[in-house]
Amino acid sequence: MAGLLINDRNYRTHVGDGKVVDFHGPRPLAAMPRRTAFGECRVAATMDENDLIPRSEWPDRIRQKDREKTWIKDLCAEIPCMDQDGLNYCHAYGPTMAVMCHRLVQNQPHVLLSAESVAGPVTNWRNNGAYPEDDLQQYVEFGACPASMMDKEHSRTPGRWDPAWETERLKYRVVEWLDGLLDRGKAFDAAMTMALRNLPGAAGFTWWGHEVAYCLHAQDLGSGKFAIAGRNSWGPDYGDDGFFYLEEGKGTPDIHLFAVLHMLASG
């Protein structure tokens, strides 16, 4: 089995040295106002237990996707690993990677998007944590601009950006998110279902105090054990170009689990 595998035994050695960032959470999705300023944009659909792929089917489905190389991780190899570089913006970096992955799933061209253009308005351009739901709402209402429009990497000074960034970001809006955080007993099943159905997501974990892109690949570890791949935003030196695996114990989201269902067909 290749790649960094994090589990209940070794997780303390992989949370980073002073790099764990705080974000606010959780906050019920129902608390988010539904807006229709740009047409029929919906914040989220809600996963139901009846939508879950039974565990008995996981090994065969994993083997099939391995043969076909149809995982999100396979489809999105061209997306570079992101790096927060000390910004407390994991609440936007995780969803931004998920958005970029979903654009490729929709057969749209890859565009490197700015997580700062999402987190900045949410935090009033401060280097603060936030509720990831607010970043999702930002994606629905306003989207994210291409990173090339910033004056430099990690910039929080939009007055120096390309003046068209606020207009350009409207091309990269989310039409619908899927809220997959069922009760803790089913959250890993929901994440596995998203992975097997090629629904790139973002997940938050209390033990880590961190938000990452998630549901990008899965592994059958044998003896009824499974792991799901995420991609961190701490640069390519973490794991394998940012990719890592969480075994079920540590891989069960308990704060947030969202997947992108549909993006605007533009940009």
Image (tube, rainbow, N blue to C red):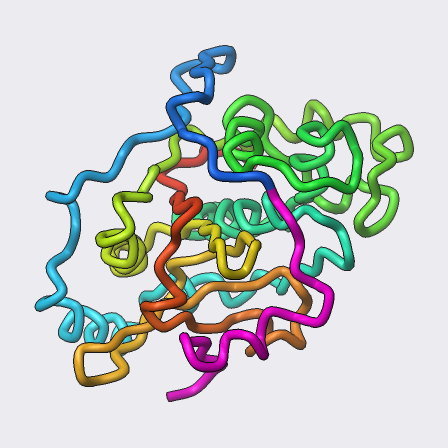
> In the figure, residue 189 lies in which quadrant?
bottom left
Residue 22: say if magenta: yes
Q: Is residue 164 left or right of residue 41?
A: right
Residue 89: say if magenta: no
Could you tell me if residue 21 is visible in this image? yes
Q: Of residues 79 and 15, which is closer to you in this image?
A: 15
Instruction: Reply above or below: 242 against 136.
Output: below
Residue 247: image location, x then y, percent? 36, 73
| Marker count (numbered) | 0
Residue at point 62%, 63% (across, down): 80
Placement of the N terminus among the 4 image quadrants: bottom left
| Principal secondary structure, stretch drawn in magenta | loop
Residue at point 38%, 31% (across, down): 176
Residue at point 43%, 46% (across, down): 255
Per the rendered image, the range of residues in magenta is 1-23
Q: Of residues 204 and 116, which is closer to you in this image?
A: 204
Residue 129: image location, x then y, percent? 67, 41
Placement of the C terminus among the 4 image quadrants: top right
Residue 102: image location, x then y, percent? 44, 48
Q: Is residue 19 left or right of residue 170?
A: right
Instruction: Reply above or below: 3 against 117.
Output: below
Q: Of residues 223 and 64, which is closer to you in this image?
A: 223
Residue at point 58%, 31% (across, down): 143
Q: Residue furthest bottom?
A: 1
Q: Is residue 87 left or right of residue 203?
A: right
